[in-house]
Amino acid sequence: MNTAPSLLDRDIRQRDLVPLDKLAACHGVVVGVGAIGRQVALQLAAMGLRRLTLIDRDAVDVVNLAPQGYTPRDLNQPKVEATARWCQKLNPEIAITTLAERFRRSLTASWQPDGQIVVFCCVDSITARQIVWDGLNVTASFFADARMSGEVIRVLASSCPRLESHYPTTLFRPEEAFVGACTAKSTIYTASIAAGLMLSQFTRWLRDLPVERDVLLNLFSGELSVT
């Protein structure tokens, strides 16, 4: 007679690195589940996060398959729904809320997620980043933003968003931005590394270690700088 294996020890190899009690108190919010955001959501689910909210208005297009890791069966479906299904395959116990719409400040007016809000901003325009920051910096306990252009990754993180001084200086006027979406040229491996860098800062925060506020990694040249 076959019996289902116990999942009690699913995280046993990471317990010295990821405090289970602190992780259990978090409610993850991933804004944008494209190239980077999808990888962030999958990694959070695998890590053992219990509550997750996914926000993105787009549906899966054929051009998303290679750089974002969606499957042909996901085509034309809302990205939040497709990502949620894969997250639940990784971690059946995770509770996921999906919002197939653009992030708006009004979303947070009556929104009361349980637990500490940890935000992963994975949008592809500076205007959207400003809106996410303005809408969530006061209520978030941790905030991370990833920016990607080709094989260049920048990850910004804050362990106390409401008092953060550096991140707002990285937001500029839309007319100063590079023309075109920052993920116009992207690969799955760059997106996965960017997601990993975000999760590494999140884990540092969980362990009460200093969070690196500004990390820049150029995969093409092999250069890494930390501010």
Image (spheres, rainbow, N blue to C red):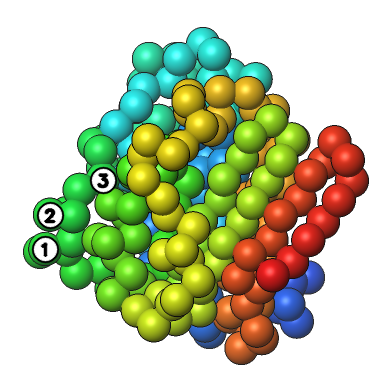
Q: Is residue 82 above or below residue 211?
A: above
Please identify the quadrant where the C terminus is shown: bottom right
Viewer-closest of 132 and 4:
132
- Badge 1 or badge 3: first in the primary sequence: 3
The residue at the point 10 percent across, 64 percent down is 110
Do the residues bearing badges 2 and 1 touch, measured as CB atoms within 8 Å? yes
Q: Is residue 189 above or below residue 154?
A: above
The residue that mark 2 highlights is: 106
Tell me: 4 left or right of 41: right
The residue that mark 3 highlights is: 103
Name the element at disc 3.
loop
The residue at the point 63 percent across, 34 percent down is 149
Rounded to the nearest whole Å, what is the CA distance between mark 1 and mark 3? 12 Å
Tell me if residue 11 can be seen: no
Whole-percent x and y of residue 48? Answer: 56, 64
Tell me: 164 left or right of 204: left
The residue at the point 78 percent across, 61 percent down is 225
State how many labels appear: 3
Task: Tell me which amino acid carries mark 2.
Answer: Ser
The residue that mark 1 highlights is: 109
Task: Tell me which amino acid carries mark 1.
Answer: Ala
Task: Tell me which amino acid carries mark 3.
Answer: Phe
Name the element at disc 1.
loop
